[in-house]
Amino acid sequence: MKKVFFAIVLSLGSVINSKAQNPIIKHIFTADPSPIVHKGTVYLYTGHDTASVTATNYNMPDWHVFSSKDMKTWKDHGALLSPKTFSWATGDAYAAQCIERGGKFYWFVSTFHKSDSVSKGGAAIGVAVSDKPTGPFKDAIGKALITNEMTKDKPHAWDDIDPTVFVDDDGQAYMFWGNGSCKWVKLKNNMIETDGPITVLNPKNYIEGPWVYKRKGLYYLVYASAGTKPEMIEYCTASNPAGPWEYRGIIQENVPNSFTTHPGIVDFKGKSYFFYHNGSLPTGGSYRRSICVDYMYYNEDGTIQKIVQTTEGVKPVK
């Protein structure tokens, strides 16, 4: 009977991990973590790797949402969004981030645009919206927020990926994104329109996967970097989201069995947490990745101590 019950739980896509060990999600392959805190719960938005063991490229059909109240047990709410949600989209579900504003949840995603009268294709950024952190989500605009034609600084078609969004204390929202260079733009209060020109940054060793946030008056731009061939995580800080950005160094070295990694940072119940992915699950790898979380510590001057990657993960919090 216990085995039957467990199988039913798995079939419903609701899995509880009883041990706070890395990787924290073990029943499917996940990547590109994006955590938020809402009403005493951490919601973790992720990509989903389904490539075969022998694959040489990604297969990422959808985005999942997980939640935890204690950083120990994680519930899988299922695949709540996919490129198929967007009539203009095609291809894989690349890195995304969901944030809350005004009681609504805006899920900024990167995928590819169909070749049509609006765009000739290439990577694009869309926005889905919901009244709840676990959906249902729908396309908030009916078109892409960013298309490949809007940015010309890089020749490759996949430069407009990996959006990160934050709302400053004055209510101004910003979006950063990009592969090969880091772009940023202001967003209007409705969170579905840009407000002004797109600006291009070139932080030291930048590749992709930016994560932008503010802490104690200091702005942080954390990103996947080209410090070595497998990506590391490096960062910059600034006193203004428009910069200038000061390079601060490496905060995470290469991860096991994956040439990519991706940061996601959140404070929860008095502690700071650093989410990332590696390829350490059985049969895992660069196209079959898994999300982990470790503690994050700051020095008195606001600089970040190097992340200590562990298999133990973090202790549960009450």
Image (spheres, helix red, strand yellow):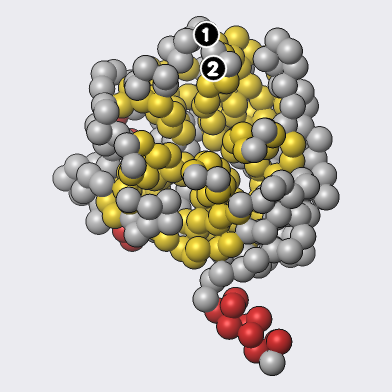
Say which amino acid is labelled 1.
Answer: Ser
- Judging depth in this view, the residue of 97 and 88 nearest the camera is 97
Q: Secondary structure at mark 1?
A: loop
**Residue that extends furthest to the left in the rendered view of this protein:** 117
Q: Is 67 left or right of 98, judged from the image as shown?
A: right
| Pointer 1 with pointer 2, Cβ within 8 A | yes
Give the percent coordinates (x, y) of residue 26: 69, 63
Q: Is 127 left or right of 23, judged from the image as shown?
A: left
Q: Which residue is mark 1?
A: 239
Measuring 42% from the left and 51% from the top, which residue is drawn there?
133
Say which amino acid is labelled 2.
Answer: Tyr
Give the percent coordinates (x, y) of residue 126: 33, 43
- Judging depth in this view, the residue of 121 and 187 nearest the camera is 187
Give the percent coordinates (x, y) of residue 52: 62, 67
Residue 299's place in the image compared with 308, above or below, is above
**Whole-Å distance between the Cαs marked 1 and 2?**
6 Å
Measuring 60% from the left and 35% from the top, which residue is drawn there?
266
Residue 234's place in the image compared with 286, above or below, is above
Q: Is 317 left or right of 14, judged from the image as shown?
A: right
At label 1, counting other C-alpha atoms closer than 10 Å, the crowd grade (few under 14, some 14-19, many 20 or more) is some
Measuring 46% from the left and 63% from the top, which residue is drawn there?
79
Q: Which residue is mark 2?
A: 219
Of the image marks 1 and 2, the number of the one nearer the N terminus:
2
Q: Secondary structure at mark 2?
A: strand
Q: Is 5 left or right of 118, judged from the image as shown?
A: right
- Judging depth in this view, the residue of 205 and 220 nearest the camera is 220
**Residue 120 seen in render:** no
**Residue 201 seen in render:** yes
Q: Quadrant of the N terminus?
A: bottom right
At label 2, counting other C-alpha atoms closer than 10 Å, the crowd grade (few under 14, some 14-19, many 20 or more) is many
